[in-house]
């Protein structure tokens, strides 16, 4: 029961609607509990980025917030549980947003595809998001649960892309759409690395992004 509130961060269209209902019906005590969890998640993410995954612990998060470890554990459980909840809060929100875009029926398939990749590429320009991503990837090399969770998140993103790609070009096989989706997703992550780590091509960043968009759309239209 205590840890069920952490599902507040399993972002989905359904949970967003549930949050709206929660805001209207929850008691002050329940709202206070959710706010406490949000505060813990934010402090955890800040420490994770500032000090690195190797220095991260629930004890340090509790110290940062000025609360006891037992108090933090009352809301968030173990360090592992806190890590997974933090990753859900900071990364899955993007997948949920992309899922919603993919279902915007007022847009053409190509418009939806471009809107998804435009928003994903825009995130590569945020240094905090880049740092959080790097720390998460490094942690996944040593933590099986985090590794599996990242596989799920990135797998969902690739599935969204693949479905959109097949809508843009219905002649593509599922296998080819999957390949294109993986290629595009990996290239976007590569942009994140180059922009954050070595500030590559900053003078021509807009042109770089537009060139990639054009290449991807042409690749999908042609289908080979």
Image (tube, rainbow, N blue to C red):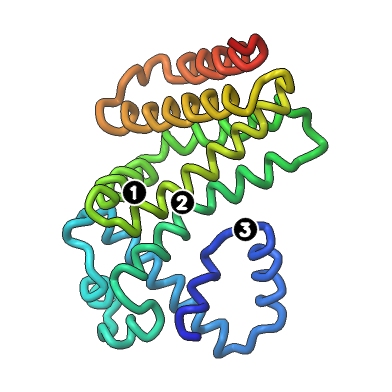
Q: Residue at x 40, y 81 (%)?
A: 75
- First reached walking from the N terminus: tag 1 or tag 2: 2
Q: Is residue 213 left or right of residue 45?
A: right
Corner quadrant of residue 167: top right
| Residue that carries the numbered disc 2 in the rendered image | 91
Helix, strand or loop for disc 3: loop
Q: 170 above or below 69?
A: above
Query: Residue 144 location, x and y as percent?
Result: 30, 56
Query: Residue 7 location, x and y as percent?
Result: 53, 70
Q: Quadrant of the C terminus?
A: top right
**What crowding class fits label 3: few (fewer than 14 Cα within 10 Å), some (14-19), or many (20 or more)?**
some
Q: Tell me, yes or no, whether the two marked residues, 1 and 2, touch with CB atoms within 8 Å.
A: yes
Helix, strand or loop for disc 1: helix
**What crowding class fits label 2: few (fewer than 14 Cα within 10 Å), some (14-19), or many (20 or more)?**
some
Q: Where residue 12 is drawn, which disc sits there?
A: 3
| Residue that carries the numbered disc 1 in the rendered image | 132
Which mark is nearer the camera, 1 or 3?
3
Instruction: Name the residue nearer the viewer: 48 or 85.
Output: 85
Q: Is residue 79 left or right of residue 173?
A: left
Q: Residue at x 44, y 78 (%)?
A: 36
Q: Residue furthest right?
A: 106
Q: Is residue 212 left or right of residue 50?
A: right
CA gap between label 1 and label 2 equals 9 Å
CA gap between label 3 and label 2 equals 12 Å
Instruction: Name the residue nearer the viewer: 171 or 64.
Output: 171
- First reached walking from the N terminus: tag 3 or tag 2: 3
Q: Residue at x 49, y 14 (%)?
A: 207
């Amino acid at each position: 029961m205590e840890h069920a509130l952490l599902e507040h961060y399993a972002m989905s269209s359904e949970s967003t609607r549930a949050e709206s209902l929660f805001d209207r019906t929850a008691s002050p005590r329940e709202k206070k509990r959710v706010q406490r969890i949000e505060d813990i998640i934010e402090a955890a993410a800040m420490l994770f980025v500032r000090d690195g995954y190797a220095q991260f612990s629930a004890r340090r998060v509790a110290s940062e917030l000025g609360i006891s470890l037992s108090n933090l554990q009352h809301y968030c459980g173990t360090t592992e549980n806190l890590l997974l909840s933090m990753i859900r809060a900071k990364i899955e929100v993007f997948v949920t947003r992309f899922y919603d875009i993919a279902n915007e029926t007022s847009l053409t398939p190509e418009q939806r595809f471009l809107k998804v990749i435009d928003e994903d590429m825009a995130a590569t320009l945020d240094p905090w998001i880049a740092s959080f991503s790097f720390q998460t990837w490094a942690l996944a090399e040593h933590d099986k649960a985090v590794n599996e969770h990242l596989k799920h998140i990135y797998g969902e993103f690739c599935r969204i892309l693949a479905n959109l790609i097949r809508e843009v070009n219905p002649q593509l096989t599922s296998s080819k759409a999957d390949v294109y989706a993986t290629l595009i997703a990996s290239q976007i992550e590569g942009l994140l690395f180059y922009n954050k780590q070595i500030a590559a091509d900053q003078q021509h960043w807009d042109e770089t992004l537009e060139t990639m968009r054009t290449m991807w759309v042409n690749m999908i239209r042609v289908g080979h």
